[in-house]
C-alpha cells in the first residue's frame, strides 16, 4: 500500500506557491531554506513528478505542480478542520478584515463560510472601503488584515491573485460606439480608473466620466443598463455584459492584481487562520469564460491556470 502524503510537506508547498519565494516561504513555515528545499524534493519523490522547473535563476510550477495545488489545499484544510473539531483550545477572539466593495461581492461569501466553519469562536468584522482608505485604517490600527488592489508603487502587499482587467459594455446596447464614450468608474484614486483613462489617452480615444462610484453594484448597473462602459476584472463579469477589445477601439489593460496586507501585533494563530482561508478562497474562485458572441458566462475552469503558468519562484 502506498504511503500517505505528508501534510507538513503540502503546507510548505502551499506557502511557496502563495508567497512566490522559497526563501520567504521558509520564514512563513518557520523552517530553514534547506529544510524547505528538502521537503519539496521528498514531496516530488512521493508524487513521482517534478513540481518545479528551472527557468534561468528562478523556479516555476510545472503542470504537475498546478494539478497538485487544489488537492494540497483540500487536504490541509481538512486536516485543520479535523484538528479544530477536537481542539478544546480552539481559536477565539476577533479579526477585523477590510476589502473593497468590488472584492466583497465576489470573494467574501466563500471566505466567511470557510472561516466560520473552522473557527466558530472567532468574531469576523468586515469593512468595505476603497484600497487607499483601507491602507489608512491599517496604519491607524483600525483593521487587522486587508484585501487591496496590489499596487507595489504605492504600498507593500502580498499578491494573491491576478486576472485580466477588461473593458465591458452591455450586450443589448451600443453605448461603446458613442463619441465621447461614457464611462462608469471608481473614484479618482481608483487604480483601474487611472489605468483605463491612461490607456484611452494613449490611443486618442475621447471619453467622458459619466458615473463615479466605489460600489461595484452601481458600476455594474450602469453598464447593464447601457448607460456606460466600465473596467472590471474577469471574475466580476456578469451575464449580459460584453467584453470590448481593440477591434472595438479599446486598448488592452494590465492585469488586475489582488494583494493582502497584515497588521503587525495580531496574535499569530488568528492571523494565520484568516490568511489561509483568504488565500484558499481566492484560489478556488473560477474564471469567467466568454462565449462566441462575446458574452460573459460562468466557467468550471480552475481560476489560476493562466496565472500559474506565469508564476516565478526564487531559486532553491
Image (cartoon, rainbow, N blue to C red):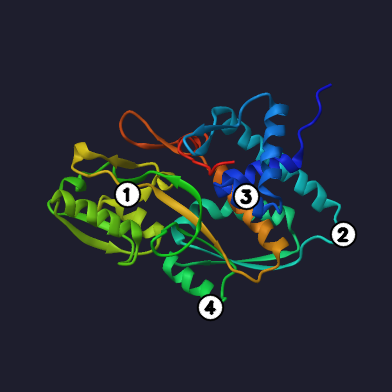
Question: Which residue is at the front of the view, 74 or 23?
Answer: 23
Separation of marks 4 and 2 at Cα, in angstroms: 34 Å
How far is disc 2 from disc 1 in space, using C-alphas?
50 Å
Q: Nearer the viewer, mark 4 or mark 2?
A: 4
Mark 3 = which residue?
Answer: 25
Distance Cα–Cα, label 1 vs label 3: 43 Å
Instruction: Specify which label sits upstream in the sequence, 4 or 1.
Output: 4
Which residue is most to the top? 1
Q: Secondary structure at mark 1?
A: helix
Tell me which label, 2 or 3, sits earlier in the chain.
3
Which residue is denoted by mark 4 in the rendering?
Answer: 140
Q: How many marks?
A: 4
Circle 3 crowding by C-alpha within 10 Å: few under 14, some 14–19, many from 20: many
Residue tagged 2: 88
**The quadrant where residue 173 appears:** top left
The residue at 30%/58% (across/down) is 193
Of the residues under marks 1 and 3, which one precedes in the sequence?
3
> For the residues marked 3 and 4, what is the alpha-carbon distance in whole angstroms?
28 Å
Residue 224 image label: 1
Q: How much space separates mark 2 and mark 3, taking CA atoms?
A: 29 Å
Residues under numbered marks 4 and 2 in contact, where contact means CB atoms less than 8 Å apart: no
SS category of the residue bearing label 4:
loop
Q: Nearer the viewer, mark 2 or mark 1?
A: 2
Question: Residue 56: image x %, image y %?
Answer: 46, 35
Residue 300 visible in the picture:
no
Q: Secondary structure at mark 2?
A: loop
Amino acid at each position: 500500500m502506498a504511503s500517505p502524503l505528508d501534510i507538513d510537506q503540502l503546507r510548505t508547498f502551499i506557502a511557496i506557491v502563495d508567497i512566490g519565494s522559497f526563501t520567504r516561504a521558509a520564514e512563513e513555515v518557520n523552517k530553514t531554506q534547506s529544510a524547505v528545499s528538502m521537503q519539496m524534493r521528498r514531496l516530488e519523490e512521493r508524487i513521482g513528478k517534478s513540481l518545479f522547473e528551472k527557468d534561468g535563476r528562478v523556479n516555476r510550477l510545472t503542470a504537475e505542480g498546478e494539478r497538485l495545488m487544489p488537492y494540497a489545499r483540500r487536504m490541509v484544510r481538512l486536516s485543520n478542520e479535523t484538528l479544530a473539531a477536537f481542539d478544546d483550545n480552539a481559536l477565539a477572539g476577533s479579526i477585523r478584515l477590510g476589502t473593497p466593495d468590488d472584492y466583497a461581492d465576489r470573494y467574501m461569501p466563500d471566505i466567511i463560510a470557510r472561516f466560520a466553519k473552522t473557527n466558530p469562536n472567532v468574531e469576523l468584522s468586515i469593512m468595505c472601503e476603497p484600497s487607499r482608505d483601507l491602507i489608512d485604517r491599517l496604519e491607524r490600527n483600525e483593521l487587522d488584515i486587508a484585501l487591496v488592489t496590489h499596487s507595489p508603487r504605492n504600498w507593500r502587499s502580498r499578491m494573491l491573485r491576478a486576472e485580466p482587467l477588461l473593458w465591458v459594455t452591455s450586450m443589448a446596447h451600443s453605448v461603446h460606439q458613442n463619441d465621447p464614450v461614457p464611462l462608469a468608474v471608481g473614484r479618482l484614486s481608483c487604480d483601474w480608473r487611472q489605468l483605463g483613462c491612461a490607456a484611452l489617452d494613449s490611443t486618442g480615444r475621447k471619453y467622458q466620466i459619466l458615473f463615479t462610484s466605489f460600489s461595484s453594484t452601481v458600476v455594474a448597473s450602469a453598464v447593464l443598463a447601457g448607460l456606460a462602459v466600465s473596467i472590471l476584472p474577469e471574475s466580476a463579469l456578469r451575464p449580459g455584459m460584453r467584453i470590448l477589445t481593440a477591434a472595438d477601439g479599446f486598448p488592452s489593460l494590465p492585469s488586475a492584481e489582488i494583494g493582502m496586507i497584515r497588521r503587525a501585533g495580531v496574535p499569530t494563530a488568528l492571523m494565520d487562520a484568516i490568511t489561509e482561508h483568504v488565500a484558499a478562497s481566492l484560489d478556488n474562485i473560477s474564471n469567467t469564460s466568454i462565449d462566441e458572441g462575446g458574452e460573459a458566462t460562468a466557467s468550471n475552469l480552475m481560476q489560476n491556470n493562466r496565472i500559474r503558468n506565469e508564476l516565478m519562484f526564487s531559486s532553491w
